[in-house]
Amino acid sequence: MLTGVFTALPTPFSADGSIDTAHLVKLVNAQLRAGVHGVVLLGTTAETPTLTEKEKKQILDTCVPLLKGHVQIIIGAGTNNTLSTVENIKTAAHYKPDAALVVTPYYNKPNPSGLVAHYKAAAQVGVPLVMYHIPGRTGLKISSPVLDELLAQVPQLVGIKECNYDMAQVTDTAVKYASKLSYLCGNDELLLQFLSVGACGTISAAASVLAPGFVKLYNLFNAGKTHEAFAIFTKMYPLIKACYLETNPTCIKYMLYKLGFGTQTVRAPLGKISGENKAKIDELLAKTDKEFLV
């Protein structure tokens, strides 16, 4: 089972736009010190669509040796092209990850038979799969009957990263499947709600900045200390919300820059955040307990 706090790791860039390996290593080590249970490499937060194949290999070659044997590793591999998704999983397989993260195909919005065929093809590589369900980015919201069919036909799907804001549907899915697979929260601001209906952890972009706080919250909740967990959550909540003032990972990159993890550089088509949002983040960072920050 994939359980606990998984940080969706961003890609630090130098001012010239190249990968900043030194700060990538620093960020990985900060996550390990915080006690995270896993790390997701080459996810959305890593700006993977803007990375070359050589750069993806550079990130994996840098991070996997640091993480292996300490935490679980998930490698992002999904695209809206089944053949390229399979090739990405084959590449990921060389690093022996605990799972590959495969998003539901975006833009082309496959019908049920196509969706099942996509995941069946992905499963043939032999790496366990985590389905990334994020209707807000893909335009595809999987109905309960289609999810039932998908999970019945693709037993290699060992988890779901759920970024669905429909809590009624989330609850339905949790009741059916939370005891059978790794049901992971993908909405940072709804973490406690997800945990309360049986989610076993989170894949979190905000944990890039707030890993110590997320780990403490998760551990308290699992120990039955729900009121203490909520107290921590309320303290972190304003900064969690601020992570998404603009498109992820622009605000997270700015926060990490302010915390000493390289530049705030993102790659086009993303751009710098507004001065107004920088001022809001500066104020919130100053107010946030340092024990919650990397």
Image (tube, grey):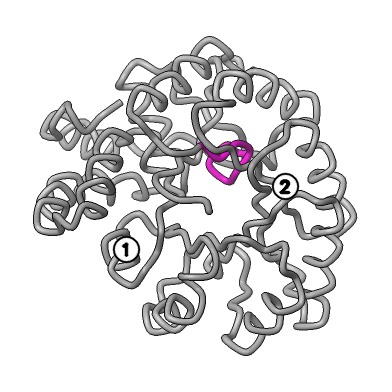
Occupied quadrant, residue 239: top left
User: Is residue 221 in the magenta section?
Assistant: no
Q: Is residue 64 left or right of residue 107?
A: left
**Which disc, if any, is residue 208?**
none
Which contiguous range is marked in magenta? 39-47
Q: Is residue 137 left or right of residue 115?
A: left
Q: What's the residue type where badge 2 is placed? A: Ala
The first of marks 1 and 2 along the sequence is: 2
Query: Where residue 10 appears, x then y in whole percent?
Result: 51, 33
Q: How many marks?
A: 2
Q: What's the residue type where badge 1 is placed? A: Leu
Residue located beneath label 1 in the image: 195
Q: Check the image and report above or below for 78 versus 63.
A: below
Q: Residue at x 51, y 60 (%)?
A: 182
Which residue is at the front of the view, 33 or 85?
33
Query: Where residue 283 appears, x then y in whole percent?
Result: 15, 34
Q: Is residue 15 left or right of residue 98?
A: left
Q: Is residue 70 left or right of residue 103?
A: left
Which residue is at the front of the view, 137 or 144?
144
**Which disc, if any, is residue 77?**
2
Judge the density around disc 1: few (<14), some (14-19), many (≥20) Cα neighbours within 10 Å. Answer: some
Q: Residue at x 43, y 38 (%)?
A: 37
Query: Where residue 246 appears, x then y in whole percent?
Result: 40, 48
Camera-near label (1 vs 2) is 1
Q: Secondary structure at mark 2?
A: loop
User: Is residue 44 in the magenta section?
Assistant: yes
Judge the density around disc 2: few (<14), some (14-19), many (≥20) Cα neighbours within 10 Å. Answer: many
Residue positioned most to the right: 83
Query: Where residue 85 appears, x then y in whole percent?
Result: 81, 52
